[in-house]
Image: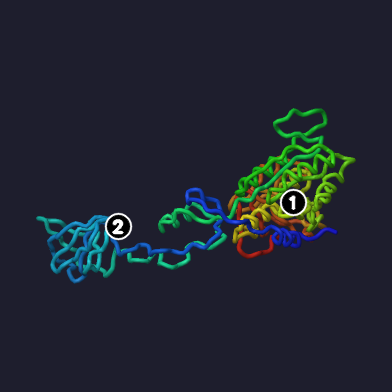
Amino acid sequence: MAISVEEALDQIYKLSLPLGGEIAPIENAVYRVLAETVVASHSLPSFDNSAMDGYAVRTEDAGKTLPQSCVIFAGDEGEVRLVENQCIRIMTGAKIPLGCEAIVPIEEVTLSDGKVTLPPSIKASQHIRLKGEDIQSGMVLLEKGTMLHAHHISLLASQGITHVTLHRRPRVALFSSGNELKMHFESLGSNQLYNTNTPTFASRARELGCDIIFTGTAEDTLESIQSHIRSALNADLIITSGGVSVGDADFTKKAFHSLGFESAFESVDIKPGKPTTFGRIGNSVILNLPGNPLAAALCFELFGQSAIMSLSGRADKYLATITTRISETFKMKKGRRALIPGWFDGATFTPSPKFGPGMVLPLSRANGFMMVDEKVEGFDAGAAVKIIPTRWCMGSESRHSLITH
């Protein structure tokens, strides 16, 4: 019996557990997931410093003409004291001298005969960056499960952190099967097709931060498929699609079950994608997607992406949606939850003009899809819809409904 998408995702999250950690330099940590919480070891700034090139002054000296006693540059060592009836030339980033109450920017003073005339009004603490106003020692900078981006690396570098503990990249194993299919680097025979599913899964898994293992093309025999499965069992996730050629359709299922496959589900109430299967052998989770290219690609976005985000240790492992409006009237058949590809232009979503489960072109011209409730027969132009992006990964730390009603 087919289970709901929500029940299928429950099983995927249950079995796809975060992988162990490894230490890596921060330069190699972009698009990796933290396996530790990072706490600030020191405040930033670590001392009061000037936000401008200008003059260190006391507020009571506003409007006065004063001599300049010295110059403080960024990085200068030692303490300097500002004394009465003097000002100090100071550069951006330089440490604030003792007794200084404000910084006056150079463009707000008048210079004459080696003396400095200050403006008539000076606000206390103006243009002074205070110790710890950005980061305070002991505060949590990054939580475990954070996917690191370039600006996170900036944060780590600001603390003098050279290495971090990251979740290991998921290893995803793929193999092709079916005498009617050939890989794109092989010659086609009569009545044969190029296999588009395996390159699609490999490319998307790589975009999601995985290491890819391709074991090759299995022959349409139980023994060959078993051999490829054994070769893939050092992977964290094995992804296959469809069965094998007509007449031998049970080989793939038999091969997996003969090697100890524990099924979590074998059918999902969704169109396209009903034959989607998920389970595990030992420590490897296994996802078998539909054989039709568009159906396989869309179901990868729902189920494959969810498994990868969970294995990666991401705190935001749950798929998130963008709420927008549909650009045109759209009609459809009700009865089963449906996946509708299309293009989101930042303001509205336009469903693909023509698509079917066996097609390849539509998803290449789509950047998202909506999952429509089984009771819906269509939408009027301007109706609110939820879309799941396919050109970028969008996660959430809490789980929300993905369905457009």
Location of mark 2 (residue): 93
Q: Residues within 10 Å of mark 2 (few under 14, many from 20)?
A: many
Q: Is residue 252 visible?
A: yes
Location of mark 1 (residue): 287
**Left or right: where 69 falls relative to 301:** left
Front position in the image: 364 or 267: 267
Query: In what quadrant of the picture does the N terminus appear?
Result: bottom right
User: Which residue type carries mark 1?
Assistant: Leu
Residue 246 image position (x, y, % from top left): 87, 40
Q: Dot 2 lies on which element?
A: loop
Query: In what quadrant of the picture does the C terminus appear?
Result: bottom right
Figure check: 384 above or below 214: below
Q: Residue at x 37, y 66 (%)?
A: 132
Q: Is residue 328 visible?
A: no
Residue 227 image position (x, y, % from top left): 78, 42
Q: Residue at x 15, y 61 (%)?
A: 117
